[in-house]
Image: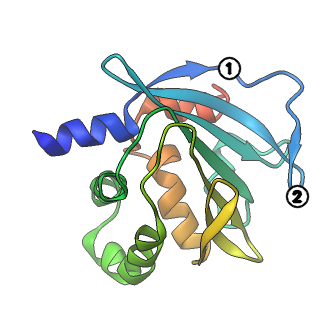
């Protein structure tokens, strides 16, 4: 029961929010595609924002050559170990054991670089085809590595099939069914 509660608190249920009109570009011409708030019971857990290149179809959001950025602004304190537990729980639903085993070292490194978060902290997950995956906490890079496949896996926690929340996925992709 504790795992389900932790999972719900960390990733929560999402209330869709439409993308802001006149979205501002973010590094390398990424623009806000969509945003949503993750909630669990009466708690707002975090605000999530997805940035993609202009004109990218929702179906291309996880493709290898698509640059992307996901930011999570936390509304309450959460332990690193609970974030890791929730991430592994979702990844295990999405990927066969052999794929997870082949990426375990990279995933363990990414998770080890994470820190506990407090209210107002922002984790940013960024992928660029030429640089790989960068994880930042409050604009300070804490880990860099991986490739397109690792990016697909980790962004898939929010954007892939069997994601954390279909509502949050739709909100992040701008409620577009393209």
Residue 72 coordinates in the image, percent (x, y): 57, 43
- Which quarter of the rendered picture does the C terminus lie within? top right
Q: Which residue is at a point 57% across and 27% down the rendered structure image?
A: 36
User: Residue 18: which disc?
Assistant: 1
In front of the other: 46 or 146: 46
In front of the other: 140 or 86: 140
Quarter of the rendering containing residue 104: bottom left
Q: Regarding mark 1 in the picture, which secondary structure is present there?
A: loop
Q: Is residue 128 left or right of residue 154?
A: right
Color scheme of the displayed model: rainbow
Circle 2 crowding by C-alpha within 10 Å: few under 14, some 14–19, many from 20: few
Q: Which residue is at a point 33% across and 73% down the rendered structure image?
A: 100
User: Residue 138: which disc?
Assistant: none
Q: Is residue 174 above or below residue 84?
A: above
- Which quarter of the rendered picture does the N terminus lie within? top left
User: Residue 28: which disc?
Assistant: 2
Residue 56 coordinates in the image, percent (x, y): 78, 45
Q: Is residue 82 above or below residue 5?
A: below
The total number of labels drawn is: 2
Q: Which residue is at a point 50% across and 37% down the rendered structure image?
A: 119
- Residue contact between numbered discs 1 and 2, judged by CB atoms under 8 Å: no
Q: Is residue 140 above or below residue 89?
A: below
Q: Is residue 153 left or right of residue 30?
A: left
Q: Is residue 17 above or below residue 60?
A: above
Q: Is residue 32 left or right of residue 47?
A: right
Question: Which sits earlier in the primary sequence, circle 1 or circle 2?
Answer: 1
Q: Can I make out residue 178 in this image?
A: no
């Amino acid at each position: 029961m504790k795992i389900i509660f932790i999972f719900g608190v960390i990733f929560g249920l999402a209330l869709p929010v439409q993308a802001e009109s006149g979205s501002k570009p973010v590094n390398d011409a990424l623009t806000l595609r969509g945003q949503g708030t993750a909630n669990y019971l009466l708690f707002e857990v975090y605000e999530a924002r997805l940035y993609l290149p202009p004109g990218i179809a929702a179906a291309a959001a996880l493709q290898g050559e698509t640059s992307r950025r996901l930011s999570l602004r936390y509304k309450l304190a959460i332990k690193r170990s609970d974030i890791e537990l929730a991430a592994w729980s979702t990844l295990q639903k999405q990927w066969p054991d052999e794929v997870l085993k082949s990426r375990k070292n990279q995933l363990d490194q990414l998770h080890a670089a994470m820190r506990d978060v407090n209210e107002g902290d922002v984790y940013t997950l960024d992928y660029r085809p030429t640089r790989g995956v960068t994880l930042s906490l409050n604009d300070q890079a804490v880990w860099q590595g991986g490739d397109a496949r690792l990016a697909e896996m980790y962004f898939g926690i929010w954007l892939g099939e069997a994601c954390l929340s279909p509502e949050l996925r739709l909100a992040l992709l701008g409620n577009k069914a393209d």
